[in-house]
Amino acid sequence: MRDKFVAGLALVFAGLLIQGHASAAEKPRARDLGVPFDGTPGPLNAITDVPGVAVGFTTLISGEPPLKEGVGPIRTGVTAILPRGKSSYGDPVFAGWFRLNGNGEMTGTTWVEEGGLLSGPVMITNTHSVGVVRDAVIGWLRDRDLLKDGNYPWALPVVAETWDGALNDLNGFHVKPEHVYAALDSAKSGPVQEGSVGGGTGMVCYQFKGGTGTSSRVVEAKFGGYTVGVMVQCNCGGYDELRVAGVPVGREIKRINLWSSLKSPTREAAMGSIIIVVATNAPLLPTQLNRMARRAAIGLARTGTTVSDGDGDIFVAFSTANGGVAKDAGYDSPMKLRNAQMVPNDYVDPLFAATVQATEEAIINAMVAAGDMKTLDGRTLIGLPHDQLRALLKKYGRLNP
Amino acid sequence: MSSVKPRARDLGLPLPGIPGPNNAITDVPGVEVGFETLTEFATSAGQTQICTGVTAILPRGHTAQPLSVWAGQFDLNGNGEMTGTHWIRDAGYFLGPICLTNTHSVGTVHQAAVRFMIETYSEYFGRYHAWAMPVVAETYDGLVNDICGLHVTEQHALAALRGARGGPVAEGNVGGGAGMATYEFKGGTGTSSRRIEVNGRTYTVGVLVQSNFGKRAEFSVLGVPVGRHMTENAVLTGNGLPEQGSIVVIIGTDAPLTPMQLQRLAKRGALGIGRTGTSGGHYSGDLMLAFSVANPVYFPAIGDEQPHTYHAEWLNDAHLDAVYGPSVQAIEEAILNALVAAESVPTIKPPGETLHAIDHAALVAVMRRYGR
């Protein structure tokens, strides 16, 4: 099994090379193309600028159209975001969440809502693989002896999804537990891959190729100098809706309309979802993190979507501050009070602004990095063309020199 | 098997209200229930013990047409999982089965439920753009089951789903309830129903619980403080452990209710639980879901013809009390039914003890003492 999987990985890499993808370091990102974003990013402009946050991916790319259910083509994967890296499972982070439109799944929100805590990784995959990913997270925790000795004996993993059935053999159930373990095992800090990677591999964003994107912001020293990092799995937006730095890019770039043949009375092509994960090292309480999660909707709105009925737009925000505060106390120890820190509410606005800015940039980063991909019926879904984007920014007076 | 076992009513407990013919959730027309139970008891110390399973509820039975049901949801204490609730909260309906299992098998069962939906509604998923968001909920059976062994497979869940049927429903150590504890007695799966009369029209409300909650000292039956008298073999209290269970309450009805009304009905789940004495522990995932099979509506998948409007009928709010009262009664009875039907099993955590079923004669004796 293991050998087969390693062989599979080799194929994945071969596939990537054949498709001519450059490595993450060489790829231009949205700001490299001159998109004028607000705010100051951290050194990596990624969610991993928040100290301790680790990200891992498993990307599954094999086979070619047309669709043969159970066989392929496979264009999917798993994304893992570990708030405190791999080593401190028993130390939950404070968390909040927000559902902008609930036509989707994010497991674990019942406890995030009740306890204000997030106890493990945040995973993102395709719609029909939520289950396998969830239980594999439990298997991974168990194998690392993390479901005993002072920790909760049960886990309620957070696993979210978006639908990749336009590019991937979704009903073939190609995500397996070993892919989940690989994403978790490979999680690390440092630069983060974008575009058609991990859970974002087969996603569609404003009818361009979408996927995984990230960005970060650092707030001014007088507001604590904290970092806000955002990661998105972007699969949403209508054909005409896309705006980049306010420029109506969606209306101006000719491309295929995936859904043009559908009998749909709803806004053409406004079918999809977005999962947004917001991380910060600012000491925020769960109530403040709920408010921060809502700001992700504002960042999303900057890219133009009006959010369709079919959207599962679900966001989670967490703070890596207050380490140890939410650890399980153990039922029979004598109670000791714990002190938690919080940013005064008068100072949260810069963190909210950072969330909005980084969310917007993460979405555009996902699209800039994604590249072209074939649909199940063999058409080419284009990535956001860099030269046309630059030309449009220039035309509307928004190109950064 | 289940017809031979006494139920709470058979013990002479003066339970209020008029149940349907099966006194089960299957009294709601169309509702079908299936179980897959896994038991493999350890015969020596250190051996793996499996005592778990899957319960499947099909709100509209084995119908090939993908008809949603209207629904509402409520969490009394959210230390638990119920998938599919985002869309229920936003849209007020869901498509597909409801499955109950142990905490660590929600994912496996979820994937099986997705597979079952793709199979069952093959045109909907094959021809159009559709995605599955089944409802899967859980309670924790680690007291008697090797929960971290992840023993539930997709095949087990598919067997429960495919085997679902109407008629009498098994109770106690069956399906997802196989390894559950209630007030530190052996708990599990329980069901009950009530006939409702509103302005001369008859409806049914049916309840199914996966019952796994409560500290012995709080246990109360029809107002009688039974837990204060039946203090023996309380496996958590005796080992200095906190209340660590949960309860999932599924309420089905054929009364025509809107999602808003069903959300309010789901809140009554907390009242039904409360009648049995619990104060709702921190470790508990007390999750309620209410659905109505009335107003069957086909929501076409993306790509299919879309009607312009729908028409629905619903109860005047002024008549809702006629639904609430019987629902609370049925929830209380379903929990008692789970307790009465359950059978003792050995524990693994703590090792070597027994999670005892409630002694029927002792329960009746306490009730008698209080004139009940």
Image (cartoon, coloured by chain):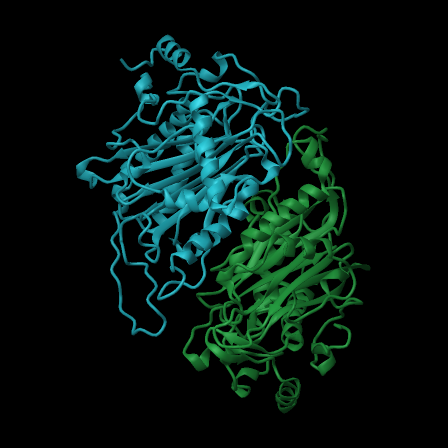
- Image spot of residue B281 (x, y percent): 46, 68
Is residue A13 in sight in this rendering? Answer: yes
Q: Is residue A333 above or below residue A110?
A: below
Q: Is residue B83 above or below residue B351?
A: above
At horizontal 42% and vertical 24% (from top left) the residue drawn is A17
Question: In terms of depth relative to the viewer, which is nearer, A159 or A280?
Answer: A159
Q: Classify residue B218 as left or right of residue A289.
A: right
Percent of width and height locating residue A60 = 49, 34
Q: Residue furthest front?
A: A3
The answer to whether B155 is drawn above or below residue B10 in the figure is above
Q: Position of residue A330 (x, y in %)?
A: 34, 69
- Which chain gets the green colouring? B
Establish if A202 lies above or below B35. above
Q: Quadrant of residue A353?
A: top left
Image side of residue B179 versus residue A339, left or right: right
Q: Position of residue A251 (x, y in %)?
A: 50, 14
| Chain in cyan colour | A
Please identify the quadrant where the C terminus of chain B is shown. bottom right
Q: Residue at x 27, y 54 (%)?
A: A323
Q: Is residue A107 visible?
A: no
Q: Residue furthest left?
A: A222
Rendered residue at 45%/82% (across/down): B238
